[in-house]
Image (spheres, helix red, strand yellow):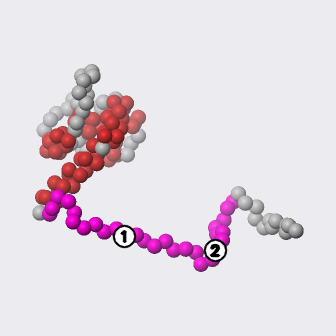
Amino acid sequence: MTTFPRQSYATDLSDEQWELIFPLIVLPTGGAPRTTDLREIFNVIYYQLRTGCQWRLLPHDFPPEGTVRWYFHRFKRSGLWEKINDHLRRAVRVQAGRGEEPSLGIIDSQPVKGTRTSGESGYDAGKKQGYQAPFSR
């Protein structure tokens, strides 16, 4: 397993997991050389996803918050998260002996019940209770 200059977290990608994801990442060429390890970026994103912590509260042994957020939003705009999900879904289906793509889709909807009486229901604390507008002639 690859070692990082920090404590290992339960959310860190294994070597096998990284080998599945890495070929899907397409980065632009040119510009300044990247100084942050992409695998570490994914480790931070998965840590944040799993723990639900705020970006600014990530542990200090991770790359800077701004760097991680920049990559996260770049991957989101490029469709990388959907691409990874589709790739992994296909792999799981093939491993289970099924076709890569589902052959049938089922859409289920639950009916919404309406009230038996029409009109207002419930209580609005902002309205004056018991006030009746005078009839206009």
Residue identifier under label 1: 108
Residue 63 belongs to the span the image colors magenta: no
Question: In the picture provided, is 119 more to the left or to the right than 59?
Answer: right
Q: Which residue: 24% across, 33% down?
A: 27
Q: How many marks?
A: 2
Label 1 packing within 10 angstroms: few (<14), some (14-19), many (20+): few
Q: Which of the two residues, 48 or 61, is positioned nearer the viewer here?
A: 48
Return the mark for residue 118: 2
Q: Which residues are magenta?
A: 98-125
The location of residue 21, given as percent across then percent down, is: 19, 43
Q: Are the two marked residues, 2 and 1, in contact with CB atoms closer than 8 angstroms?
A: no
State the SS at label 2.
loop
- Magenta-drawn stretch contains 107: yes
Q: What quarter of the picture does the C terminus occupy?
A: bottom right
Judge left or right: residue 79 versus residue 13: right
Asked whether 58 or 111 is in front, the reply is 111
Residue 112 coordinates in the image, percent (x, y)? 49, 71
The residue positioned 23% from the left and 30% from the top of the image is: 37
- What residue occupies the far right of the structure in this picture? 137
Name the residue rendered at 30%, 30% in the picture. 63
Give SS at disc 1. Answer: loop
Residues at marks 2 and 1, CA–CA distance in whole angstroms: 27 Å
Q: Can residue 72 be seen in the rendering of this structure?
A: no
Residue 132, above or below 50: below
- Residue 43 % position (x, y): 26, 39
- The residue carrying pointer 2 sits among few (fewer than 14), some (14 to 19) or many (20 or more) residues within 10 Å by Cα, namely few
**Prevailing SS of the magenta stretch:** loop
* Quadrant in the picture for residue 95: bottom left
Q: What's the residue type where badge 2 is placed?
A: Ser
Q: Residue furthest bottom?
A: 116
Q: Is residue 87 visible?
A: yes
